[in-house]
Amino acid sequence: MKAVTGVLPAAGSWAFELKWDGMRVVAAVGDPDQPLRLDTTRGLDAAARFPELAGLPAALAPHRLVLDGEVVAFRDGRPSFGQLQHRMHLSRPAEIVRVAPTIPVVYVVFDLLWLDGDDLTARPYLERRERLFEVVEPGASWLVPAHHIGGGADLLAAAQEQRLEGIVAKRTDSRYLPGKRNPAWIKVKVRPRQELVVGGWQPGEGGRAGHLGSLLVGYYEDDARQGRHPVRRRRARPPRRPPPRAGQRRVPVRPAATPPGRAPGPLGAPRARRRGHLRRVDQQRHPPAPQLHRHPRRQGPPRRGPGRLTAVRTRCLRPRFGLVAGGP
């Protein structure tokens, strides 16, 4: 069962829990053929990824049960999905054994669906929680979090103060509907806000020419009267280069070395003083600076022929393009 996104309910009988920034897992525990199975939302068994939970069947014996919860990794005392990503995608046993001691996980159990042959999904939320506390004792790598009847606003304020993801409101009489998203569960997220000042923008370059390239925004620090507002620039991601057309071949990058006795050019490569083969025009490696200008001067008319180009000398304050000409 999944929650819908919404606002804090104002009326009704609701219980409130913290929202854990983890990986949703349904655990089947105590089966003789398979003592532990951890089913993800994609239907995959993740038991091998989290060896910390291998002791769960022995701790809950002789019961056979199905639990719902989240696998959570912590950083600085708070749940961190970014920290969990270093564990949840590992599949090779050697990597799992190596990383598990440095990034431990905890299985946070918040619902009980099945117990010793008794299907509890049709029971009210509070009854399922009561049975859960009776059966599951906290261990080194699993726990049952507390729930609060009422006081959702206070719990949300505490979650915001501690920079947690949010809270979940659940109706106290709600049934568990497997695989469905139901308004009987409402997740209320903590959304950090920041007032920003738009200072300007810069035009796009390369594939974004003619479009917005980046936006300059800033924010005020403690004393805005002193005019201290550091600017953070956010640049739009340029699109990928289009693939070469039919019959066209993309030229690979070949570094140019500086011959002995010759001073390097502005790009650390020999200056183009004679006609030769064009090696590379790399706009990705040497992005143009929008405030600079170039003054090209062509040496004679271009020669026509396959793979030939008359070199163009460019006098720049700083280079805009990595144009390297020379022999093959």
Image: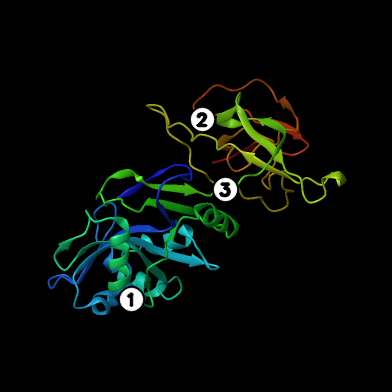
Report the Cα–Cα distance between label 1 and label 2.
76 Å
Mark with earlier residue (1, 2): 1
Q: Look at mark 2 in the image and give the residue it sits on.
A: 307
The C terminus, quarter of image: top right
Q: Is residue 31 left or right of residue 73?
A: left
- The residue at the point 34 percent across, 61 percent down is 69
In the displayed structure, 168 sits above or below 91; it is: above
Q: Secondary structure at mark 2?
A: loop
- Callout 1 secondary element: loop
Q: Is residue 156 left or right of residue 177?
A: right
Of residues 110 and 28, the one nearer the viewer is 110
* Amino acid, disc 1: Glu
Q: Measure how far apart labels 3 and 2 are at the Cα level.
A: 18 Å
Q: How far across and how far down the image is residue 122, in percent?
A: 21, 53
Say if mark 1 contacts mark 3, CB within 8 Å. no
The dot on residue 137 is 1
Amino acid type of the residue tagged 2 in the rendering: Gly
Q: Identify the image quadrant of residue 158.
A: bottom right
Q: Which residue is mark 3?
A: 255
> Dot 1 surroundings within 10 Å: few (below 14), some, or many (20 or more)?
few
Mark in the foreground, 1 or 2 = 1
Say left or right for 151 vs 221.
left
**Is residue 191 positioned above or below 146 on the image?**
above
Q: Badge 3: few (under 14), some or many (20 or more) residues near its Cα, within 10 Å?
A: few
| Model colouring | rainbow
Give how far apart the Cα atoms at labels 1 and 3 are.
64 Å
